[in-house]
Image (tube, helix red, strand yellow):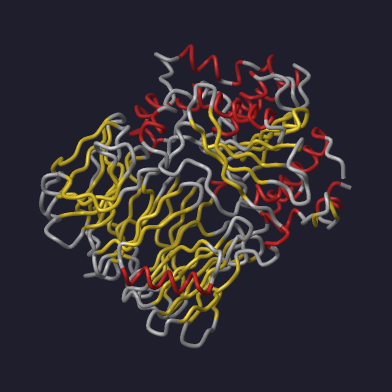
Amino acid sequence: MAMAIAFSSCMRNGAVQIPVNEFFKTPQKSAFKISPDGKYISYLKPYKDRLNLFVQSLADGNEHMATSFTDYSLHDYYWTYNDQLVFSQDVIATDQLKIFALDIATMKLHLLMTGNKVRMRVISRIKEDPNIINVAMNKDDPTRTDVYRLNIKTGEIKSYLVNPGNFTEWFPDSDGKIRLVKASDGVNETILYRADDNSPFKQVITNNFKTRVEPIAFTGIKNNFYALSNVNRDKTALVEIDAETGKEVKEIYANSNADIMGVEYSKNRHKVEYASWEEAYPQKHFLDKCMAGIYKNFEAQLKGYEIKIIDRDSSENKFIINSYTDRDPGAFYLFERKKCKLTKLGDINSSIKPDELCAMKPISYNASDGTLINGYLTFPQGRDSTNLPVVVMPHDWPYGPMSRNSWGYNPEVQFLANRGYVVFQVNYRGSTGYGKAFHSAGFKQVGGKIQQDITDGVNWLIANKTANPKKIAIFGGGVGGFSALYGVSFHPGLYNCAIVQYGVINFFTYIKDVPPFFKPSLQMMYEMVGNPETDADQLRAISPVFHTDKIKAPLLIFQGAKDPRANISELNQFVIELHKQNVPVSYFLKENERAFFKSERNRMQMYTEIEKFLDTNMRVKQ
């Protein structure tokens, strides 16, 4: 019966009820890229519930199915300079990483390497030798990521840059050679520079972890580089830095209201084309007249859409762009500069009809200590704006470089709004984009002011009569899942129920059991979350695993058995203890899934269960 409800279309509150599968099916086409020579478009497309690689010739428009995996989807893929594609496959059952190369001329596939519990990412392509790419891998030591030169013709792997143990990021020049690295002792962060491959690295910048310097690219003038920096300022700015001295040469662009969070860069001209940031909505400031003209063309043809450049060919004549709104998952286009031609390549989800979905509206309120908190409200169609059922959605891990809610299309938000719920997203203190002071105000506050910001937001919705105080749910993943459990533990009666995806239930094991590759950042986690030795009382006081007696509201829990951050035996015991406390718990543990469910079948089951759970516990009338 539940499946019949989930996959039928009916009317709710005057709006068309969209089937679950239309929100959460695998994208029709995604991860578009263009070959460096501009002759081919590549993308991922589902085949038997797995994402596979497809290549389309721009000369004749013919599409070729390059892979036909039915066990696991492709993970990441990259073009080389000689029309080769390199990609990886995460074999979840055995925790293996397989790396393949595909020759476009012959469409022949060959396995380059297999590694157990290995993580890999491509750092750069090498212009002087198109068969070589630089890859960062932890194949020799699970706790240390080194850089290797991988020959995609022969599969030969040679050491290029041995990590002394504290290198965390690598930044190549336009030729693909690594000349800047970032190192961390967990508290202090250091930028090191070398003039060429034969020179030693030297320290040029050292900052406390609260301060950020993120290199972008070399400017082509002397040894200067562009970077995002909040040194001696609260809001991150786009600056130019002398790599020899580490000194800031000039500030290129800053915004007094928000951190600059992204840039678009021309490799050919060694020039930043625009800086971007987020206030209520995404914003851009153009630093290049040519790119400003291109975007003006985009905006004329795609009115009302947010637009991003995804990829470009080496000559910077052909671009892949992505367009989207809060109500439209969007589409991909090919833009040919010389022809001034925009051609649609594919929709992410053509089943979605934007006029049936709901607007995401920016909001702000004052927390109980006076701090201004921002967020978003999405109201269901056809509903009065008062006394409505609300689903609170706190975001995940608060301390990463892009840890926040943003304006744009979110299938979970639209699914819940379509089912008649107001969706409340909070950018609590610790969230990024609002400056250094606001970000650092969240340190060691995962069970303190961060949770209070969420609670204050719920009380604000009740006070202004948006929320029906008897119909409020909380739903989150990761640290957002912790916030959901914290809410029903320490604010009894505020929430009807909680939904938890890959949630943190014990900060002791969460910190202790970090994957080996995360070890260099462990000290930073102590500073941001807490030290299991010196902050033991604090971590015990907030970890849900120690407070099952406080939980009374119904819970719905989802977990992937192969999530490297999860302690499955502890989670199983947590659920058993909740049952002993007579807490209504529905628990779904999925084999061969990590934190995020990649199987379409598992996703459909999860959101069908979420729909039933909310209908039961929020008693929303059909």
Which residue occupies the extreme front position in the image?
464
Left or right of residue 558: residue 125: left
Decide: is 302 above or below 470. below
Q: Is residue 113 above or below residue 553?
A: below
**Quadrant where the image shows the C terminus:** top right
**Where does the image place residue 44, in percent across and percent down from the top left?**
54, 66
Q: Can you say whether 519 is above or below 191 in the image?
A: above
Q: Nearer the viewer, residue 459 or 622?
A: 459
Number of callouts? 0
Q: Position of residue 374 (x, y in %)?
A: 52, 38
**x, y (%) of residue 469?**
74, 28
Q: Residue furthest bottom?
A: 60
Residue 156 appears in view: no
Residue at 69% of width from left, 25% of height from top? 575
Residue under the point 61% across and 46% down: 592
Depth check: give the residue in front, 527 or 380.
380
Is there any visible trace of residue 76 in the rendered image?
Answer: yes
Residue 567 appears in which quarter of the rendering? top right
Instruction: Specify the farthest residue to the right.
Output: 1
Q: Position of residue 20 (x, y in %)?
A: 75, 53
Residue at image location 51% in from the left, 33% down from the top: 373
Residue 617 relative to residue 456: left or right? right
* Quadrant of res 83: bottom left
Vertical placement of residue 82 versus 453, above or below: below
